[in-house]
Image: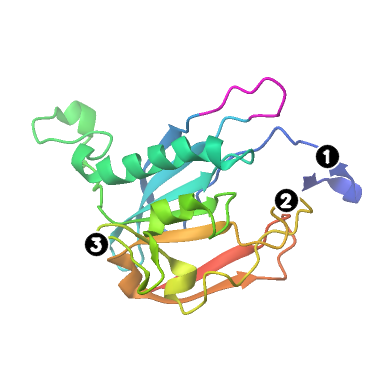
Amino acid sequence: DVMGPGGQPFHRRRQFGNMLLSKTPILTARNHLMPKMGTLEQFSLQRCALEGVIHSPKGKALRAMSVHLSHLSDADREPQIARLLDIHQRAYHEGPGWCGTRVSEAFTEGQEAAPMPREALIMGDFNFSWRSPLYDRIVGPLSDAFGRMPYRDGLIDSWVAAGHREDEGCTCHSGSVADGKRIDYCFVSSELSKHLSNAWIDEDSIGSDHQAIWIDMDI
């Protein structure tokens, strides 16, 4: 809740959603609605993935997605993961919101179409731990003999790429069934993972019942 004058909380619980902040320009943005389970009794909320193409400090176009998946169950999250991966894989093929060269200057106002990179960061509250089959869907299967087997064009868990174990770390202190687990992630394309130098969980952050994840990337 936002703290108001005099330190009294204003319970604006329905002012709730995804946010994408950047020190450098966000060139384009798209909001993707996730599949939603129409439950009879349990509270079910429309979820989304907010995607932006960001002009990085070194001039590289970077695609980032802010995600918050369902809190209900893996059964509800499974179609959301399928949709999320489909959006990611189709992004470059589809291009930005507008593209092409035969476009009236009255529409472009002298500007070029924004880029749509293949590589991306997909980050947020996924509401599942590394033990979930949905984690495997994102980062590849786990082999007893060879460990985690990521796909060539897949996504990497930045926490693990920075040297941590999958089973260590905690991002949730909500008192829910996810308490004490790492359910917040920053997944990066395999190509971007080469630029990753560090990842850590901010244990002192108090703005949420989840702890913030930080990563360092030289891009």
Graded by Cα atoms within 10 Å as few (under 14), some (14 to 19) or many (20 or more), the crowding at tag 2 reads few
* Residue kind at label 2, given as amino acid type: Val
Q: Could you tell me the amino acid type at mark 1?
A: Phe
> Of the numbered discs in the image, which one, if any, rests on residue 152?
3
Q: Residue furthest left?
A: 102
Using a 10 Å C-alpha cutoff, classify the residue at mark 1 as few (fewer than 14 neighbours), some (14 to 19) or many (20 or more): few
Of helix, strand and loop, which one carries label 2?
loop
Q: CA distance from mark 2 to mark 1?
A: 27 Å
Residue 143 spot, x, y in % from top left: 38, 67
Quarter of the rendering containing residue 210: bottom right
Q: Amino acid at mark 3?
A: Arg
Could you give the CA–CA distance between mark 2 and mark 3, rounded to whole angstroms? 34 Å
Residue at horizontal 75 percent and vertical 61 percent from the top:
206
Query: Is 144 positioned to the left or the right of 165 in the image?
Result: left
**Quadrant of res 149:** bottom left
First-in-chain label (3 vs 1): 1
N-term mark: 2 or 3: 3
